[in-house]
Image: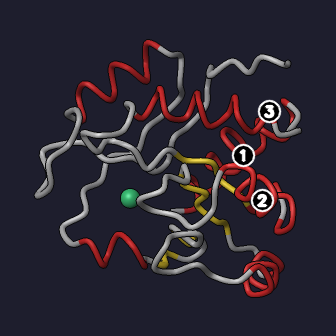
Amino acid sequence: MEEFALKDAIDSHFHAGPDVRERKLTYLEAAIQARDAGMKAIPIKSHSTITADIASLIQPLITHPDHLFINMSVEVQKELAQEGVFFDRCFPTEKTSPLRMEEMAKRIREVGVMSSIVTSDFGQPENPSPVEGIKIYIQQLIQLGYSNQEINQMVRINPGRLLNLL
Ligand SMILES: [Zn+2]
């Protein structure tokens, strides 16, 4: 199995405290963990409402397209991808997504690596830390057939492009 180094990777969607909901760690702790893992940047934001988090569409990023409550169809995602939209591929947990990891891997393959951004969306007390989460996510995608180059596109190039745009 290929190894993917987290150096310069970006987790553009995770949660930390202080927040209205309980979080696993503070933004400072998240920043330190990301730095220690050699990651490049972690954006800091806070969601004040659940709905804003679940269905936010910040052109050109669609967050949670594969969330339980959204579950945007592959056809629609493909159309939007052609318009230059990025999709936030949050770690699929049973609580948040109808997709298991194999299905997420398939979804990304169908819509395309070029429009996908792999993020943890972690920070909830019951989940691993964001850095651990993105590590596990990357490892599993590699096991499911993604190359280092494709992972690079989804954790460095695409989020880098997006953050410059926002
Ligand atoms: Zn979120």
- Describe residue 164's horizontal placement relative to residue 120 as left or right: right
Residue 7 position by quadrant: top right
Residue labelled with disc 3: 142
Residue labelled with disc 2: 108
Pick whichever of labels 2 and 1 is earlier in the sequence: 2
Q: Residue at x 53, y 24 (%)?
A: 39
Q: As displayed, is residue 7 above or below residue 156?
A: above
Q: Residue at x 68, y 38 (%)?
A: 156
Residue labelled with disc 1: 154
**Residue 63 percent coordinates (x, y):** 51, 68
For the N terminus, give its image quadrant. Answer: top right
- Describe residue 24's horizontal placement relative to residue 59 as left or right: left
Labelled pair 2, 1 in contact (Cβ < 8 Å): yes
- Give the distance between the C-alpha atoms of the residues marked 3 and 2, in whole angstroms: 13 Å
**Residue 148 percent coordinates (x, y):** 84, 30
- Give the distance between the C-alpha atoms of the residues marked 1 and 3, in whole angstroms: 12 Å
**What secondary structure is found at the residue carrying circle 1?**
helix
